[in-house]
Image: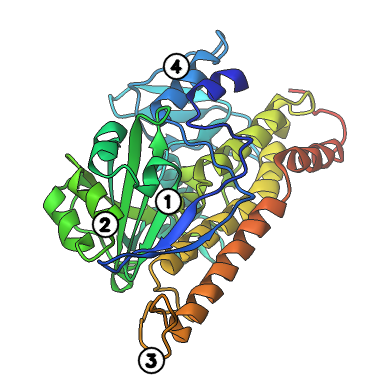
Amino acid sequence: MLDEFKHIFTHDPERSRGPMLRRSDMREGGYSWFQRVTQSPSPMVRQQMIAILERHLPASCTVHPKKRLVSYMEPEQEDTHSTSPIRLEFADGTTTTTDILIGADGIRSAVRKAMFEAASEDDRKDKADLKQYIDATFTGMIIYRTLVSAETLRKEHPENFALREMTVYVGKGRYLVAYPVAKGTMINFAAVVCDPALTGTNYEGHWMSNATRDELVEYFNDFEYDVRTLVKLCEKPSKWALHVVKPLPFCVRDRVALIGDASHAMMPYFGAGAGQAIDDAFVLGRLIAHPLTTLPRVHDALRIYEEIRLLPARSVASFSLSTGWMYSFMAPGYYDGGRNGDDLDDSGISSYEREGMENIKQEILRRWDILDESESVMLAWANAELKLQALGGPIPD
């Protein structure tokens, strides 16, 4: 499978050259901020990646792409952990049953909704607080997305940084990420506009809608030429209201588990959301497939998964969200993006700005280092297997 992925990578993943960050909210020219050379992301087109994964599904898997789950019903529990089937209810009115339910159904997860509604009816001290985890919460950030032809950009501005590497153009309250995809034939474009006053509010309207180039021009007309050129070439951008899932107190209830965005939908600023979902699936899949995991022991296996994966994924989600505020100079306690000061250097930058930018840089690098040094998924699986083995032999069905 890795060989297939290499065919859709934009560049060699062994290359040691991470994203370049620039201070760009100055019309007459920005400046290079920093670049993390020890990191080497390998951009690819999402649809191509999904197609590869689909091709590797075993023949024993039956996929129903047009079935939308709306809820599930727990079995009547005569004892602590029933082994009776879980009832699934679909949007088309059909139902079925299953022994195990894994909610990988995204940020608007029907499984999460049913799980926390059921938990809120339990006799527990925190039951009044549990419904807050049903719906995702608005971050106060809007992202505009589109693809730009690399050939067209090259004709318009051959020196544009985004043609060569992933570039993050930062500014007060706004920033833009652009990088080559599809073997360098297209430029992925993502522009973010931030308003912390809207954090946690009810977002009115559709989470995703069509936008116009004029909206982007209004937001980024005072940015450097690189950014203005990218915005000029945007055609039919889409507009997304960025939401997150609040840090869940649990992601497992008996024989039901949440993974990926259903459990910890996060901001894209570490590029780690999909990776965290894959780590979830790796650990959970191996636990379920383990010879010790018989039906009466499924709830134990899922609890081990929760113990191993919930907190690490929540930490990455928290880091990612606060890093987004740093890119926009709106993170509490950090540099606010001001360009005041009379002690300007040869580049026209004051010591206030230089020191503030350096402090944010060091904090972002520290977070990347923490992510790099975090427990590998193989070690996480080894710990999970030890916990499962410590429970003893399999319980007969």
Badge 1 or badge 2: first in the primary sequence: 1
Q: For the residues marked 4 and 3, what is the alpha-carbon distance in whole angstroms?
A: 64 Å
Give the residue at mark 2: 225
Which mark sits nearer the N-terminus, 2 or 4? 4
Q: Earlier in the sequence, mark 3 or mark 1?
A: 1
When the figure is inspected, residue 319 is found, relative to residue 264, above or below; the finding is below
Q: CA distance from mark 4 to mark 1?
A: 38 Å
The kind of secondary structure element at disc 4 is loop
Helix, strand or loop at mark 2: helix
Residue type at mark 2? Answer: Tyr
The residue located at (53%, 34%) in the rendering is 102
Residue, disc 1: 167
Q: Residue at x 39, y 74 (%)?
A: 330
Of 354 and 371, which appears nearest the observer?
354
Kind of residue at disc 3: Asp
Tell me how far mark 3 sits from mark 2, CA to CA.
Answer: 26 Å
User: Where residue 336 sits in the image (x, y, percent)?
Assistant: 40, 79
Report if the CB atoms under discs 3 and 1 are less than 8 Å apart.
no
What SS does tag 3 mark? loop
Asked if residue 53 lies left or right of residue 220, the reply is: right
Query: In front of the other: label 3 or label 1?
Result: 3
Residue marked by disc 4? 63
Do the numbered discs 4 and 3 sit on residues whose CB atoms are within 8 Å?
Answer: no
Nearer to us in this view, 254 or 77:
254
Q: Quadrant of the C terminus?
A: top right
Looking at marks 4 and 1 on the same chain, the residue that comes earlier in the sequence is marked by 4
Of labels 4 and 1, the one closer to you: 1
Q: Earlier in the sequence, mark 4 or mark 3?
A: 4
